[in-house]
Amino acid sequence: MRFPQPCRAAGLAGAAQPVTRSWPADFRWGASTSAYQVEGAAAADGRGASIWDTRSHQPGRIANGDTGDQACDHYHRYAEDIALMREIGLDAYRFSVSWPRVLPLGRGQVNPAGLDFYDRLVDGLLAARIEPWLCLYHWDLPQALQDQGGWTRRDSAGWFADYAVLIARRLGDRVKRFATFNEPSVFTLFGYVLDWQAPGVIDRDAYLAAMHHVNLAHGAAVDVLRDLVPDARIGAIHNRQPCRPAGPADGAAAAMFDACWNRAFPDGQILGAYPAELVDEVAPWVQPGDLARICRPTDWFGLNHYSPIYIQADLDAVLGFAWGAPPAERPQTDVGWVIDADAFRDTLTDVHRTYRLPIYVTENGYGGTDAPDAAGAVHDPERIGYLRAYIRAMGEAMDRGADVRGYFVWSLLDNFEWGSGYSQRFGIVHVDYASQRRTLKSSARWYADQIRASRVPTTSA
């Protein structure tokens, strides 16, 4: 999840000790990335263009004119990155497949070189005893499909299902953990309402059509994966945060935003119904039987969470809401996101009670401006403090009954952070973008200690 906020330092001190408690024996500790943010090699080996290639090359769209053309060059340096994962002690690695790398036009002719890359990546992970968690879509729609209407066309559900068939047949003999989408609420709202992300459209009907068609695509992909991948464990990844009114007159706007941000996708996919606030809005695109096509059985709920969101009413906005300022007294990260571990605990508890699925925290992390010191080391005590506070809050949610089975830090690597380009660093591994040198930050070493400590049975907190 990425959104603009004013920058303000957190003042959050690092805590050296890991969170000790009785962790489940099969609890998964991992890290997440996404294809466009780390792979680079944007024009290599037959890869097609995505909507993010297009947007990042439009003047003024990305901070400092940055693009994902090179990013972290993970496409060529994946073996080095797997070695870092192993050094940290990760159980699992969540990555996404670049749709235009394997299908340059989104449909039709397959790019063998693109599929070969994911073969090498998966095989390397398995050789290192790191479980691959594959996300089919992390925001990089092939530009050729956008030119045909993208997610605003009902046909997009079929396009996505065909893409899922290709990936299932190629990688399903080795990959068993699949996510259909990452944060559909974010890429639809930011891409079709706020013009903060690709494809950069401001259109109420386009947004509502895309919402419904992405939900249809999710259901179609679940069916494909069930049919083609024996023992597949399938989920979707949802961004979920408390949506709080910025002021006394903003309650209705915050409620509408909550429906769009937190509930439009998981409610349809898991509960089989749209939130009441959206039923009439989306009705023109819903055909008989659609909700049954969307609500397909899944095995887990992927939760991305960083911060509460503060919303204000804006009658001139497409849906009547706009981003509001958080309370000035709230501590914030270096990139201006409110730090509230209690909100994380309460969100986990709410997701458990509402959806009754095992939960994997698939993104959580701290955005900073880390830099090496004179000796080349990267110290990030604020990130350590953040991670410790949020992991502790996760444990509290588990004590209250939340069925949380894994935690993936965002992110393994500093990377291309969408509209912020390379100005924000979320990685536990520092990347010098000029040389592509990787350096484990102090947070990576702390996270390694956290993983090791979790293997020791204890009841202390």
Image: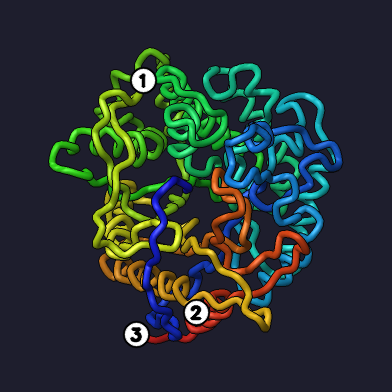
- In this view of the protein, which residue sits in the foreground, 444 or 90? 444
Local crowd size for mark 1, using a 10 Å CA cut-off: few (<14), some (14–19), many (≥20):
some
**Pointers 1 and 3 in contact (C-beta within 8 Å):** no
Q: Position of residue 65 (x, y in %)?
A: 64, 43
Q: Earlier in the sequence, mark 3 or mark 2?
A: 2
Amino acid carrying label 2: it is Gln
Q: Earlier in the sequence, mark 1 or mark 2?
A: 1
Q: Position of residue 148 (x, y in %)?
A: 64, 17
Relative to 311, is 268 on the left or the right?
right
Q: Earlier in the sequence, mark 1 or mark 3?
A: 1
Residue for badge 1: 282
Q: Position of residue 18 (x, y in %)?
A: 44, 82
Which residue is painted at 81% across and 39% down in the image?
A: 43
- In this view of the protein, which residue sits in the foreground, 222 or 231? 222
Q: CA distance from mark 3 to mark 2?
A: 15 Å
Amino acid carrying label 1: it is Val
- Label of residue 450 in the image: 2
- In this view of the protein, which residue sits in the foreground, 461 or 150? 150
Relative to 337, is 31 on the left or the right?
right
The answer to whether any part of residue 94 appears in the image is: yes
Which residue is painted at 33% across and 26% down in the image?
A: 317
Residue for badge 3: 459
- Reply above or below: 459 against 404: below
Q: CA distance from mark 1 to mark 2?
A: 44 Å
- Label of residue 220 in the image: none
- Give the structural element (helix, strand or loop) at label 1: helix
The answer to whether any part of residue 231 appears in the image is: no
Which residue is painted at 38% across and 56% down in the image?
A: 337
- Reply above or below: 444 against 238: below
